[in-house]
């Protein structure tokens, strides 16, 4: 997830404010600060209580139980999903999903499996066992194929395990110049397929997938631009989500002072689909094995070694690993780091503090706090930087007094 995705909530909040679409709340609250004062709101219906107080996040460095950093497999052109003949094998590539791999996984898998079926596959080898490999394997099984996964690592030792875990289908998925109408069409189809699949995974034991509230905070009105930001040193990314998927998620709602506990003048509440990656990755793996899937530990040094495999059709879902395996320099590493605080089940909301590079996500396995740096782009270094996470946690703590 990146800040642009969170700020979509803020801009949606602003759009809601200017169209007068306000939530019914305590009528005694003063109107929000900012240039565009909202129209008066209808009185609160007596049968509804005011919103409950939010449980504070216990943001202290000594509560950090894990810090992980890894690289997003970014391609300016977007994910590579296409068939190639390598020796006597048909290899369908499915890699390069940037910061949106979890979000697009099911739709991307659908595309890749269609290509495998077109190649007359009955048995399929999937190389890679991250978010993309596992979902591809499951979609192939449902299409009636016998599937073996070959991978160097499996959960929890794959990069996918270290993602933030939110619906962010356009996060660093391509650059603006490559967002052609054809790309947008394919992206939208992938995103909608994935979104539909995720709604079938709600309400399951362990809550692998759930919807959570979040609060976007801003020191300045949402319609005022921020000073120079980390992302400004990165390429320009298209805002595909707000352009093409506006009907999928609820709009953010601006809140007046008194309607939230945060010591920040501008606040809006959004809803966000969250992936509890520990539980979710286990569910995916269990489903794959129950459907007769096989998982083999195997590392490939070069694509010629694909000829060792029994299957004639392969799907290459090696993520960032494809850079070395295929010598594909179009994959650019974008470093990301997250710290996990001891789980607080009572904390059921996320936070994005605009202009402060602060993001917190309420996962079941802990409150996730992202740390971003100006040197993340094209940075393959996945050594955790504890000081950066401690600083992010301290910033989070400043919101709780
Ligand atoms: C900090 C951070 C936060 C993120 N947050 C989100 C988010 O909130 N939402 C979202 O949708 N996305 C998010 N992403 C992006 C998402 O995590 C990636 O797009 C996704 O994990 C890519 O999955 P993958 O299966 O392609 O790669 P991987 O998880 O890296 O899996 C690759 C697999 O291929 C195997 N492999 C690689 N090379 C070889 C080889 N030579 N031989 C054999 N096997 C090999 C590996 O062992 C592994 O099994 C985030 C990424 C980062 C870094």
Image (cartoon, rainbow, N blue to C red):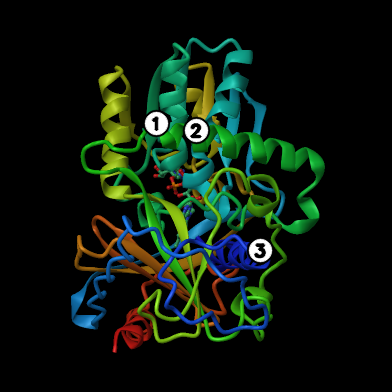
Looking at the figure, which quarter contains the C terminus? Answer: bottom left
In this rendering, the answer to whether 67 lies above or below 250 is below
Is residue 183 left or right of 386 when viewed as pictured?
Answer: right
- The residues bearing labels 2 and 3 have C-alpha atoms spaced at a distance of 26 Å
Residue 37 % position (x, y)? 63, 78
Is residue 27 left or right of 184 when viewed as pictured?
Answer: left
Residue 337 % position (x, y)? 41, 69
Residue 359 or 210: which is nearer the viewer?
210
Circle 2 Cα neighbour tier, 10 Å, few/some/many (<14 / 14–19 / ≥20)? few
Residue 85 % position (x, y)? 66, 25
Residue placed under numbered mark 1 in the picture: 200
Instruction: State whether label 3 is within 8 Å of ligand 1.
Output: no
Q: Which mark, residue 15?
A: 3
User: For the residue labelled by badge 2, is the local secondary structure a helix, a strand or a loop?
Assistant: helix
Residue 145 % position (x, y)? 44, 13
- The residues bearing labels 1 and 3 have C-alpha atoms spaced at a distance of 30 Å
> Of the residues tagged 2 and 3, which is closer to the observer?
3
Residue placed under numbered mark 2 in the picture: 196
Residue 136 or 44: which is nearer the viewer?
44
Q: Which of marks 2 and 3 is nearer the N terminus?
A: 3
Residue 156 or 194: which is nearer the viewer?
194
Q: Name the residue at 36% across, 73% down.
A: 384
Circle 1 Cα neighbour tier, 10 Å, few/some/many (<14 / 14–19 / ≥20)? few
Q: Are marks 2 and 3 in contact (CB under 8 Å)?
A: no
- The residues bearing labels 1 and 2 have C-alpha atoms spaced at a distance of 7 Å
User: For the residue labelled by badge 3, is the local secondary structure a helix, a strand or a loop?
Assistant: helix
């Amino acid at each position: 997830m990146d800040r642009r995705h969170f700020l979509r909530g803020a801009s949606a909040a602003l759009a809601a404010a200017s169209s007068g679409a306000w939530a019914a709340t305590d009528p005694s609250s003063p109107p929000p600060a900012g240039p565009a004062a909202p129209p008066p709101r209808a009185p609160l219906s007596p049968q509804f209580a005011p919103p409950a107080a939010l449980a504070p996040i216990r943001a202290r460095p000594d509560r950090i139980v894990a810090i992980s950093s890894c690289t997003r497999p970014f391609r300016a052109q977007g994910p590579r999903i296409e068939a190639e003949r390598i020796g006597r094998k048909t290899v369908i590539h499915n890699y390069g999903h940037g910061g949106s791999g979890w979000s697009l996984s099911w739709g991307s898998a659908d595309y890749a499996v269609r290509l495998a079926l077109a190649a007359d596959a009955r048995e399929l080898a999937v190389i890679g066992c991250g978010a993309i490999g596992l979902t591809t394997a499951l979609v192939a099984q449902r299409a009636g194929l016998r599937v073996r996964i070959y991978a160097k690592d499996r959960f929890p030792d794959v990069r996918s395990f270290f993602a933030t875990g939110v619906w962010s289908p356009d996060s660093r998925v391509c650059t603006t110049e490559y967002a052609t109408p054809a790309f947008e069409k394919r992206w939208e189809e992938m995103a909608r397929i994935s979104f539909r699949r995720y709604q079938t995974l709600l309400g399951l034991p362990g809550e692998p997938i759930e919807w959570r509230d979040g609060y976007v905070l801003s020191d300045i009105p949402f319609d005022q631009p921020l000073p120079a930001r980390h992302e400004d040193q990165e390429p320009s990314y298209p805002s595909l989500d707000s352009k093409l998927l506006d009907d999928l998620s609820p709009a953010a709602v601006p809140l007046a002072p008194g309607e939230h506990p945060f010591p920040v003048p501008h606040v809006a509440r959004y809803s966000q689909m969250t992936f509890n990656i520990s539980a979710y990755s286990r569910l995916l793996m269990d489903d794959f094995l129950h459907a007769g899937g096989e998982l083999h530990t195997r590392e490939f040094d070069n694509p010629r070694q694909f000829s060792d495999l029994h299957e004639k059709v392969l799907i290459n879902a090696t993520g960032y690993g494809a850079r070395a395996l295929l010598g594909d320099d179009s994959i650019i590493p974008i470093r990301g780091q997250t710290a996990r605080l001891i789980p607080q089940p009572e904390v059921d909301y996320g936070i994005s503090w605009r202009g402060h590079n602060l993001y917190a996500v309420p996962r079941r396995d802990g409150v996730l706090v992202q740390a971003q740096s100006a040197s993340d782009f094209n940075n393959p270094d996945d050594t955790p930087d504890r000081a950066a996470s401690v600083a992010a946690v301290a910033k989070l703590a400043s919101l709780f007094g």
